[in-house]
Image (spheres, helix red, strand yellow):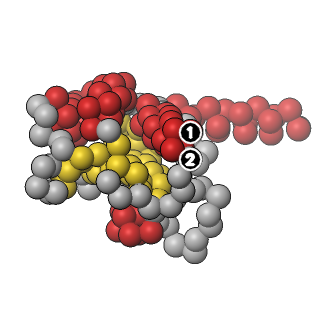
Amino acid sequence: MTTRRHLAFGMAVLVLLLGCSRYDTQLTDQVVGPVLAALGADRIAKVAILHVSEDIHVPMPITPQDLNRYGEQRFLDTLQARRSLSVALREARVSPVASDEILDLRWGVVLLSSNGQRMHEIYLSHSGLCIPELALVDGRPLRSNSALRDWFEATWGHFEATWGHHGRSSE
């Protein structure tokens, strides 16, 4: 009996993971394409990365507004940030998300024009059971493979190792 339960549980987890990993190439082009075009056309003057540690527990999910207001913020070297983010976005694969899924956003990147206008915003949710991450790209909720999380963690880690600074930073 126990073996059957383990087998049933294993099959349920496999179905869950397979269900989470279907990516939509057309949707990826539709959502990620405009961000890549802006990065490639030198329309981005500033890149800001935002973060709230997953170790910080809050009673409500963190929204883009919360992350922009309370998150740690770093401005990145624009050319290097554009190049590395472009690579991550080309590797990203997305799929639709049910409208009732809760996004507890812990990472964000805001791409700004030379006059300070927000051109594009990408947010990433607290990681959960499902391998694809919940993301918000220009207001559109999606699932993404690990390419964006890898970029956020590597970029934030590089900044911390280089500057050793905590808290909000200004350019």
Observer-nearest of 62 and 108? 108
Q: Residue at x 65, y 58 (%)?
A: 55
Q: Residue at x 14, y 49 (%)?
A: 113
State the residue position of label 2.
164
In the rendered image, the vertical position of residue 110 relative to residue 76, given as above or below? below
* Secondary structure under the numbered disc 2 in the rendered image: loop
View extreme (right): residue: 1
Q: Is residue 83 left or right of residue 151?
A: left
Asked if disc 1 and disc 2 are in contact, CB closer than 8 Å, the reply is yes
- Locate the C terminus and report the quarter of the image it occupies: bottom left
Q: Is residue 80 left or right of residue 1?
A: left
* Secondary structure under the numbered disc 1 in the rendered image: helix
Could you say where residue 34 lies in the image, as x and y percent from the top left? Answer: 16, 38
Could you say where residue 26 lies in the image, as x and y percent from the top left? Answer: 22, 30
User: Could you classify mark 2 by the number of other residues whose Cα lies within 10 Å: few (under 14), some (14-19), or many (20 or more)?
Assistant: few
State the residue position of label 1.
161
Q: Residue at x 52, y 72 (%)?
A: 60
Q: Quadrant of residue 37?
A: top left
Q: Is residue 71 left or right of residue 57?
A: left
Q: Total number of numbered labels?
A: 2
The amino acid sitting under disc 2 is: Gly
Residue 132 in sight here: no
- Locate the N terminus and report the quarter of the image it occupies: top right
Could you say where residue 2 lies in the image, as x and y percent from the top left? Answer: 88, 38
Q: CA distance from mark 1 to mark 2?
A: 6 Å
Residue 162 in sight here: yes
User: Could you classify mark 1 by the number of other residues whose Cα lies within 10 Å: few (under 14), some (14-19), or many (20 or more)?
Assistant: few
Q: Residue at x 80, y 36 (%)?
A: 6
The amino acid sitting under disc 1 is: Ala
Res 60 label = none
Observer-nearest of 15 and 34? 34
Q: Quadrant of residue 77?
A: top left
